[in-house]
Image (spheres, grey):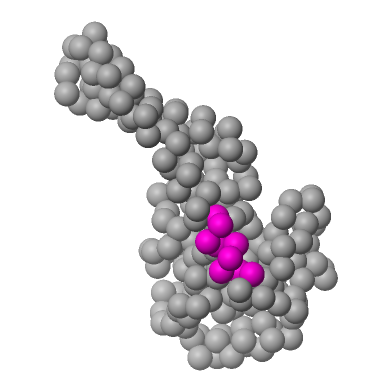
Amino acid sequence: MGKRRVRKMLRRMESGEPLELTYSMVTMKGLVRLALIAQQFGYEYEAVGQVGQGGFVLRIVPDPGPEARALAAENRERYPHAGDGGALPPPVPEAAELLKARMVLDLRRQFSTGQRVALVVVGFAAASLGFGFELSKDAATALTIAGVTWSSLMVLVTVPVALGRRLAVRSAALLEAAGYTPVPDRNGRPRYLPPGGRLPGHGNPFAG
């Protein structure tokens, strides 16, 4: 995860307003790390969504809770140069696992099963075309190779969908074991409520 992204996020957080941070070419690990850093400085994770080809939007909001305010004040004192690329609070593995589980479920509910299958099919088609034209500059030959490759990959179309479903089940079990409770958000979509907490944005004067 680049220091430039951390610096930009921390500087935008100085506004005290809800933020939507758009990233391309970022891993799940990078998104989790960014959200964890935001939580160390007075914000909390609200949601993550997928946009475009490989892009993500990370939404974070100010955390009005007294514990969050106290932690943010402590970290600003201990890490005064964090926004300038200086030292950052160390990551907490347990918190990272829970946050990753929440992100997995948030991303999963963005698309239906049918939409996920369609995305896999389109992805296979794009990969097959790229492979075909990599092997041959002749259009007819390249398209033939792509067609054969795509037909072979279609046998595996249900694999990533099944793996995603298994990951979602494990993520939900991890959250529930940690005391999180599934509740509907303001749009009626299922979210996981932290123990003794509220959905992000509730009671927040900046929340829309």
* Viewport quadrant of the N terminus: bottom left
Front-most of residues 70 and 196 = 196
Q: Main secondary structure of the magenta part?
A: helix
Question: Residue 165, can we see it?
Answer: yes
Number of marks present in the image shown: 0
* Viewport quadrant of the C terminus: bottom right
Residue shown at 55% from the left, 62% from the top? 171
Residue shown at 80% from the left, 67% from the top? 202
Magenta span of residues? 168-176
Please tell me whether residue 81 is drawn above or below residue 146 in the rendered image: below
Please tell me whether residue 111 is drawn above or below residue 125 in the rendered image: below
Q: Quadrant of residue 40?
A: bottom right
Please tell me whether residue 168 is drawn above or below residue 173 in the rendered image: above
Residue 19 placed where, x, y %? 64, 60
Say left or right for 165 vs 62.
left
Q: Quadrant of residue 63?
A: bottom right
Residue 75 placed where, x, y %? 55, 86
Please tell me whether residue 89 is drawn above or below residue 23 in the rendered image: below
Front-most of residues 29 and 78 = 29
Residue shown at 49% from the left, 48% from the top? 164
Front-most of residues 191 and 155 = 155
In magenta stretch: residue 129:
no
Question: Residue 13, can we see it?
Answer: no
Residue 55 placed where, x, y %? 49, 45
Residue shown at 53% from the left, 61% from the top? 170
Q: Quadrant of residue 45?
A: bottom right
Q: Residue furthest top?
A: 140
Say left or right for 34 vs 86.
right
Front-most of residues 118 and 87 = 118
Residue 115 placed where, x, y %? 57, 33
